[in-house]
Amino acid sequence: MAYDANNIFARIVRGEIPCHKVYEDADTLAFMDIMPQAEGHVLVIPKVAGEDIHSTPPESLAAAVRTVQKIARAVKQAFGPPGIMIAQLNGAAAGQSVFHLHFHVIPRHAGKDLGIHAARQADPAVLAAHAARVRAALE
């Protein structure tokens, strides 16, 4: 499959579609998942085009993982979960629905089930408040 430069994450990187941004540097972008599986669910993407872990340049992958670690720490501080789940899906058979490499940073609490992946869109005001909490934890 060829990389689709018009996928939603590529359009977010280009500023064509808004997002609830929590962090950005020269190589990566982190923003709230609009269909979160838990409160505080953040997505981290490299800015370079890459469909999955197989087609993303190693330098971009390394930059994304550094940002994942930074965001995971901030989410843990902001939401206080006892665990953080990091998920990265490759290919439709694995559940990937946007074909731009991305990592899910999801707070986890014992006994609390995750929501269904991409099931329903969250209230934008709630997402904005969650993004503010993560950004505050990054400061």
Image: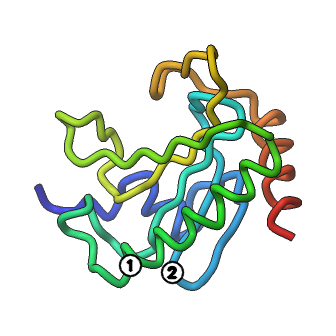
* Label 2 vs 1, first from the N-terminus: 2
In this view, 113 is above or below 135 = above
Q: Residue at x 62, y 39 (%)?
A: 83
Q: Amino acid at mark 2?
A: Asp
The CA span between labels 2 and 1 is 7 Å
Residue 24: image x %, image y %?
65, 73
Using the rendered view, name the quadrant where residue 91 is placed: top left
Amino acid type assigned to the residue bearing label 1 in the image: Ser
**Residue 82 in the image: x percent, y percent?**
69, 36
- Residue 27's tag is 2
Q: Does 130 appear above or below 20?
A: above
Question: Which residue appears at 85% of the width and 52% of the height?
Answer: 132
Instruction: Find numbered disc 2 in the image and state the secondary structure of the residue it sits on.
Output: loop
- What mark, if any, has residue 60 been given in the picture? 1
Category of crowding for the residue at label 2, using alpha-carbon neighbours closer than 10 angstroms: few (below 14), some (14–19), many (at least 20): some
- Residue 139: x and y in percent read 87, 70
Quadrant of the rendering where the N terminus is positioned? bottom left
CB atoms of marks 2 and 1 within 8 Å: yes
Residue 125: percent from left, percent from top:
83, 35
Image side of residue 64 versus residue 58, left or right: right
Q: Nearer the viewer, residue 26 or 78?
A: 78
Count of marks overlaid on the render: 2
User: Is residue 101 rendered to the left or right of residue 118?
Assistant: left
Q: Which of 115/123 is in front?
A: 115
Instruction: Judge whether 88 appears above or below 57 on screen.
Output: above
Give left or right: position of 104 versus 129.
Answer: left
Q: In the orientation shown, which residue stands out farthest toward the left?
A: 1
Q: Residue at x 52, y 67 (%)?
A: 13
